[in-house]
Image (tube, rainbow, N blue to C red):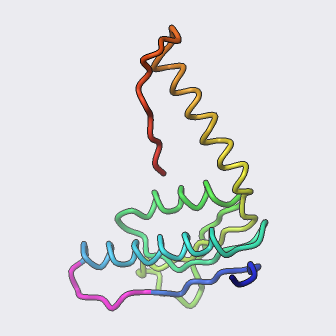
Amino acid sequence: EGEKVDVVLSDMAPNLSGVAAADAARCLLLNELALDFAKENLKKNGSFVCKVFQGSGYSQYVEACKKTFRKVSVRKPEASRSSSAEVYIVARDLKNRLQEKQQVFLLRETLLRFLNPLGEATCPKVIVLF
């Protein structure tokens, strides 16, 4: 296994087909792959910069970055045309993965208390995906 890195920079973009919905989905997939790569390969407190296109799924992607990093900002390069949907997400200070796992555990416990307030033995299983 390789060493962890300080910064992951993604300037990926798919070949565009001209079909807006398909192109947006391809862009979002590449962005999600880049974020997953950053999560696995960044050092603690590492940074991530990713080119994204504003459109379908954009706000959800920004929220995913905010769950993963402590500081997230959106920047538009001066060289970019004002009509372009292209922006860059600059995410700094990767959150501690242990802290993330503890938050999932607390969420699970809260859900179990909500779903089973009487403490009955027959409590439904809960799966949280994010």
Q: In x, y percent, where is residue 125?
A: 43, 31
Which residue is more in the foreground, 95 or 84?
95
Residue 41 in the image: above or below residue 17: above
Residue at position x 47%, y 42% from top?
128
Q: In x, y percent, where is residue 58?
A: 43, 64
**Left or right: 61 in relation to 92:** left
Residue at position x 46%, y 48% from top?
129
**Quadrant occupied by the N terminus:** bottom right
Q: Quadrant of residue 106?
A: top right
Residue 24 in the image: above or below residue 94: below
Residue at position x 72%, y 48% from top?
99
Q: In x, y percent, where is residue 29?
A: 40, 73
Residue at position x 68%, y 42% from top?
102
Q: Quadrant of residue 115?
A: top left
Which residue is more in the foreground, 37 or 51?
37
**Left or right: 43 in relation to 111:** right
Q: Quadrant of residue 90?
A: bottom right
Residue 129 in the image: above or below residue 6: above
Give the magenta-colored segment's residue range.
Answer: 13-19
**Left or right: 39 in relation to 57:** right
**Left or right: 117 in relation to 98:** left
User: Can residue 98 be found in the magenta stretch?
Assistant: no
Q: In x, y percent, where is residue 6?
A: 76, 79
Q: Residue furthest front?
A: 121
